[in-house]
Image (cartoon, grey):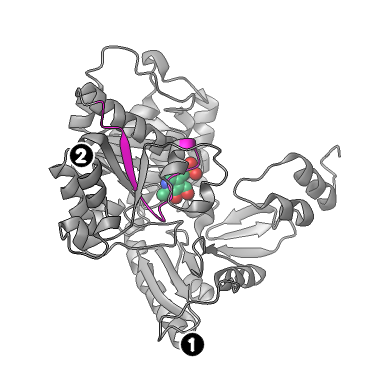
Amino acid sequence: TNLTENSTVEQLIEADKKHFIHPTTVPRTFLEEGPKIIFSEGEGVRVKDIHGKSYIDGVSMLWNVNLGFGQKELADAAHEQLTKLAYCSSFYGYSNELAVRLSEKIASLAPGDLNAVFFTSGGSESNETAFKFARFYWDLKGQSSKKNIISLKRGYHGATISTGSATGIVGFHNFSGSKDSDIIHAMPHLVNAEKGDKNDPDYKHSIRHIIDTKGADQIAAVIMEPIQGAGGVHVPPEGYLQAVKQLCEDNNILFIADEVICGFGRTGKMFGVDNWDVVPDIMCVAKGITSGYAQLGAVLLTQEVRDTLVSYDNILGHGFTYSGHPTACAVGLKTLEFIEKNNVLDNVNKMNRELQKGFDYLVEHHPHVAKTRAVGLLAGFELMQDRDSNTPFAQSIRAARHIVDHSFDNGLILRAADFEEQVNIVAVAPPLIVNKVEIEEMI
Ligand code: PLP
């Protein structure tokens, strides 16, 4: 194929199959069926495909297009910066005004004294950076045996070797070829065990048990999403985050919050941890920071972690070409300004109530809809064969996929979380600017 402006859709599809390797896609199916959709444009919560068919994006693409599509202010901010100074390096002490302004802005929004910001190009790079910083922090403190990172099963932290290893969804390990062997998984949300109840039947799967058996002197950090996203929108029980933070504090272990999905309003608060008033030592963000309009991530450090790292009197040999990218930072600044100016968090909380009502309606009218949850606009529901007796569907029945495919055919994009056997969860996370009529239409 030699694609030209006048190429047909069929030629585009052939070129796609031949030249474009897609992330997180079944390659064999792709070669047979080609792309499921070729997107062409978007406005608000809606996107169109190349044939002009319209869809409501019920998951903000990859939980990132938080302000929806066609936001002119964001496009203008990018355009202005692209024309003025598209790119410059932040290595070797070079700086730019946009990166400085954005780091100050993020620090002003973040809880506690998370005052210093290291920029990356996305979530995986942010978490990878957090792991390296946590390990290096302990090196600098003369405790270099503290290397292990504890993460949670069902968590998602990225696709690099270390963040893929920290990810607690097995499908993401099959591909990695290698593993970061200093990462240990614990069972999520064991609130009693983490609070110190060693008689809890699940104690042996807890973070506390890992610390008790391995020794706190071997552990650098614990990482978790305040609310697990890709693993199926799992909300922790009340007190869980506080208990883990306390456990970390008591044992000299850094607490890393992966706010890549939760950050910047998704849960109705600026950050996921704000729902439980927990201040992490390190906080990783990406996605919503630019609403997906530019590739940007960041790692926030408390004053103490920052002070320790900057005491290093040599080159901190870590950074990405696009760390502090001025155009990405310009879009980030405009995104945060938009969120504040337009009271986006208020809308999230109002629309949360509409979504909850919608879920109640689904439960009333559809016998297989069970266990709904929605914190802000991070939401989902499970599908069960028999919800009264808590009986899941047989493994061969991919109920969540069925719903997602059926919705897609009818113009609504959703996401299935069915990595675990017999688990059928449908994730719902529309753009934060969604309105009541659009939620009703989704339901
Ligand atoms: N952390 C969480 C919680 C995520 O949901 C994701 C992506 O979905 C990542 C990290 C990885 O981010 P990225 O894909 O930008 O590398």
- The answer to which of 332 and 227 lies nearer the viewer is 227
Q: Amino acid at mark 2?
A: Ala
297, above or below 67, in the image? above
Does residue 279 appear anywhere in the picture? no
Disc nearest the viewer among 1 and 2: 2
Question: Could you classify mark 2 by the number of other residues whose Cα lies within 10 Å: few (under 14), some (14-19), or many (20 or more)?
Answer: many
- 316 with respect to 276 (left or right): right
Q: Main secondary structure of the magenta part?
A: loop
Say the numbered circle drawn on residue 365: 1
Identify the residue at image location x=56%, y=71%: 395
User: Start and end of the magenta stretch?
Assistant: 144-161
Query: SS class of the residue under badge 2?
Result: helix
Identify the residue at image location x=39%, y=29%: 98
395, above or below 236, in the image? below
Residue 429 locus on image (x, y percent): 46, 62
Identify the residue at image location x=15%, y=49%: 246
Q: Is residue 154 magenta?
A: yes
- The answer to which of 40 and 191 lies nearer the viewer is 191
Query: SS class of the residue under badge 1?
Result: helix
Q: Amino acid at mark 1?
A: His
Q: Is residue 229 magenta?
A: no
Question: Could you classify mark 1 by the number of other residues whose Cα lies within 10 Å: few (under 14), some (14-19), or many (20 or more)?
Answer: few
Say the numbered circle drawn on residue 216: 2
Point out the residue furthest to the left here: 250
